Image (cartoon, grey):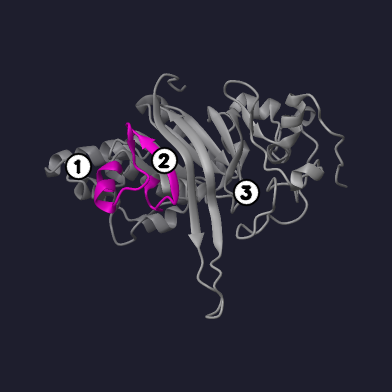
Amino acid sequence: MRNESEEILVVRGLKKYFYSERSSIFSRETKCVRAVDGVDLTLHRGEVVALVGESGCGKSTLGLALMGLEDATEGEIIFEGNDIAHLNDRQRKGLRRKIQMIFQDPYESLNPTQTIGEIVAEPLEVHGIAPSHEEREERVKKALEDAGLKPAENYVSRRPHELSGGQRQRVVIASALVLEPQIIVADEPVSMLDVSIRAEVVNLLADLRASRQIAVIFITHDLGSVGFFADRVAVMYLGRIVEIGTMEEILQRAEHPYAKALLSVVPAPNPRLRRQRTILQGETPNPINLPSGCRFHPRCPVAFDECKISDPPNVNLSETHQAACLLLTEKNNGHRQPAKFKS
């Protein structure tokens, strides 16, 4: 569980915009994709925060910005008391020892010409850690075994094509662990794996969180894969976090219509616990041309006229639970207008 008193990472007003080139030599207009558009987030030591949303909502871009692989347009990323949002590559080198990323595709993350031992040892060489061969070999073996590849001697001389998909992802995890990071950003780490292997990898990350007190930002589109693992859930839609709370609050008392729709399609083994499915109509709006007002209103099943005009603020539902929806704002103000529900 998280340490309430120790915030290891604080994100304030983070924005990441991508600007496209002009459509023609006669056009003066530069289009802008608001991939991350004003995100606030905190992460405590040993805490797991699940970042959930559809493809294109900006969750992977947020992860890349936290790693420094994408330069932030605006905002702050406070780590160990310093703003790391606008560092150069040289300044970020030391930072990457403490914040590591696990990418979605283990097939693309590993160099096929290297042995597993060489792949896991490479971060140590890049950062000048464990200069002696014996010390480096010992750390590589420990990282492999902590990642579930036991005994490590059976894997160090093999190459990626000799391993299964689950084993390859464990090698990726070992490459992150070998630097002993404080934070791991896991970007869809199980989506490329067989269903039978996914639980093993999630359990591995849960064990590492407990044994090493590593904080994890787990990026996923599937709430069901992190239901027992995450401490808090942040639901993203078109670049913004529209609801955030503890896992229990989101699973049992979600308030934003988008969060409710995501929960409604999570499989439940007990038929009595299954929710009525909410199938959102229409496509996700183009992030270059965002809707006015609430950006979810074109697909929202309970949108009313005001949603097209007003951008909803965050409403505090408890000390740990916030959501951005005009229905909640009007309810708290005590003068909710009659809703004109969409068919």
Q: Which residue is mark 1?
A: 137
Residue that extends furthest to the bottom in the rendered view of this protein: 25
Whether residue 307 sits left or right of residue 207 in the image: it is: right
Task: Count residues near mark 1 (Cα–Cα under 10 Å), then give few for <14, some for 14-19, many for 20+.
Answer: some
Q: Secondary structure at mark 1?
A: helix
Which residue sits at x=69%, y=45%?
294
Q: Position of residue 250 (x, y in %)?
A: 64, 29
Q: How many marks?
A: 3
Whether residue 100 sits left or right of residue 277 in the image: it is: left
Q: Is residue 101 above or below residue 24?
A: above
The amino acid at mark 2 is: Glu
The amino acid at mark 3 is: Glu
Whether residue 182 sits left or right of residue 283 in the image: it is: left
Q: Which residue is mark 2?
A: 76
Is residue 78 a member of the stretch shown in magenta? yes
Highlighted magenta segment, given as a residue range: 67-95
Question: Do residues under tags 3 and 2 come within 8 Å of each other at their CB atoms?
Answer: no
Q: Nearer the viewer, mark 3 or mark 2?
A: 2
Which residue sits at x=51%, y=37%?
40
Q: Nearer the viewer, residue 306 or 72?
A: 306
Which residue sits at x=36%, y=43%?
100
| Residue 54, disc | 3
Whether residue 128 sits left or right of residue 184 in the image: it is: left
